[in-house]
Image (tube, rainbow, N blue to C red):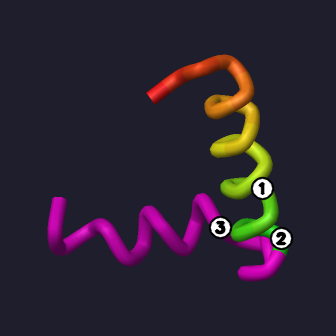
Amino acid sequence: LKQHAPAIRARIHEGIEDADYVTALRVLQRMIRNTSGA
C-alpha cells in the first residue's frame, strides 16, 4: 500500500483543487458536528 498510495491519492484527487478539497472536508466535518457525530 505504501508504494501505491501516492498514485492512488493522485487519481482520487485528479481535477480537484486543494482549496476545493479543504472546503469539502470542512463542510463534511460540520455536517457531522451538526448531527452530534464524533
Q: How many residues crowd around disc 3 within 10 Å: few (fewer than 14), some, or many (20 or more)? A: few
Magenta residue span: 1-19
| Amino acid found under the numbered disc labelled 3 | His
Q: Residue at x 83, y 70 (%)?
A: 20
Q: Quadrant of the N terminus?
A: bottom left
Foreground: disc 3 or disc 1: 1
Determine whether label 3 and label 1 are within 8 Å by CB. Answer: no
| Amino acid found under the numbered disc labelled 2 | Asp
Q: Which mark is residue 24?
A: 1
Q: Mark 3 = which residue?
A: 13
Pick whichever, 36 or 21, lies toward us: 36
Q: Residue at x 58, y 65 (%)?
A: 11
| Amino acid found under the numbered disc labelled 1 | Ala
- SS for callout 1: helix
Most distant residue in the bottom direction: 18
Q: Earlier in the sequence, mark 3 or mark 1?
A: 3
Is 35 drawn above or below residue 12 in the view shown?
Answer: above
Q: Is residue 15 magenta?
A: yes
Residue 37 locus on image (x, y percent): 53, 23
Q: Mark 2 = which residue?
A: 20
**Picture mark count:** 3
Q: Is 7 left, or right, of 33 in this rendering?
A: left
Most distant residue in the top direction: 35
Residue 9 locus on image (x, y percent): 48, 67
Q: Residue at x 27, y 68 (%)?
A: 4
Q: How many residues crowd around disc 1 within 10 Å: few (fewer than 14), some, or many (20 or more)? A: few
- Cα separation between marks 2 and 1: 6 Å
